[in-house]
Image (spheres, rainbow, N blue to C red):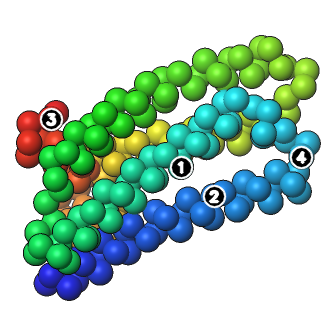
Amino acid sequence: MKKKIEKRLCYLYSGENASIICFLIVFYFFNLTYPQFQLSILSSFIVSFFLLLFILGQGSVYWFIKWRRLKQMGTADIPNKLLLYLKITKKVNLFILMFIPVLFVIDYQVRSLDVSLIGLLISIFVYLFAVLEYINYFHVQLSYDNKSDLLWLLRTKKLKRACLSKEFERINLK
């Protein structure tokens, strides 16, 4: 059972790292191929994109530490110090998520003649993706990619609490 959990945790942290790398590569080549969408001048896109990468990075660190502790110590409990750090990043993430709509208004109002509508739509998509990742990590699990998760979802007909949410509760950090 321990090996199975180790494998799952390794899959989770390496998947988040791979996502970060893939998103950076896709952004680079997309921006080169379609400069008319002007993503690099849209503050709403830049902040949303880097927030998405920041949240994925937090997830990667979380899963990596769980994997390493399970492998080395036989327990996947996260140190309280890391949980405190993640609790702070949760608040930072939320602040940035709440600020980004202001950037959309600025991009639309101030740069309305210079901005591509498709660029704004891509920015909105990336922003919504960041919102979903935030929810997935800090509130409710939205990703159900293995058999046991899917069976649980079908049996209970409700979403699971996010792992970090449970960890915060464990040390009274709601």
Q: Is residue 99 above or below residue 36?
A: above
Check the picture and name the quadrant holding the N terminus. Answer: bottom left
The amino acid sitting under disc 4 is Pro
Decide if residue 169 is on the left or right side of residue 129.
left
How crowded is the residue under tag 4: few (<14 C-alpha within 10 Å), some, or many (20+)?
A: few
The amino acid sitting under disc 1 is Leu
Decide if residue 155 is on the left or right side of residue 50.
left
Element type where label 2 sits in the image: helix
Q: Is residue 100 above or below residue 14?
A: above
The residue singled out by tag 4 in the image is: 35
Query: Which residue is at 19% across, 68% downward?
Result: 69
| Contact check, label 1 and label 2, Cβ < 8 Å | yes
The residue singled out by tag 3 in the image is: 173
Disc 3 to disc 1, how far (Cα)? 24 Å
Q: Nearer the viewer, residue 12 or 150?
A: 12
Check the picture and name the quadrant holding the C terminus. Answer: top left
Disc 3 to disc 2, how far (Cα)? 32 Å
Q: Which mark is residue 134?
A: none
Please state the horizontal and vertical placement of residue 94, each as a whole percent of the image. 41, 29
| Earlier sequence position, callout 4 versus callout 3 | 4
The residue singled out by tag 2 in the image is: 23
Q: How many numbered marks does the figure carry? A: 4
Disc 4 to disc 1, how far (Cα)? 21 Å
Q: Is residue 111 above or below residue 166?
A: above
Decide if residue 66 is on the left or right side of residue 110.
left
Query: Which residue is at 65% across, 22% downward?
Result: 103
The amino acid sitting under disc 2 is Phe
Element type where label 1 sits in the image: helix
| Contact check, label 2 and label 4, Cβ < 8 Å | no
Please state the horizontal and vertical placement of residue 36, each as a whole percent of the image. 91, 42
The residue singled out by tag 1 in the image is: 53
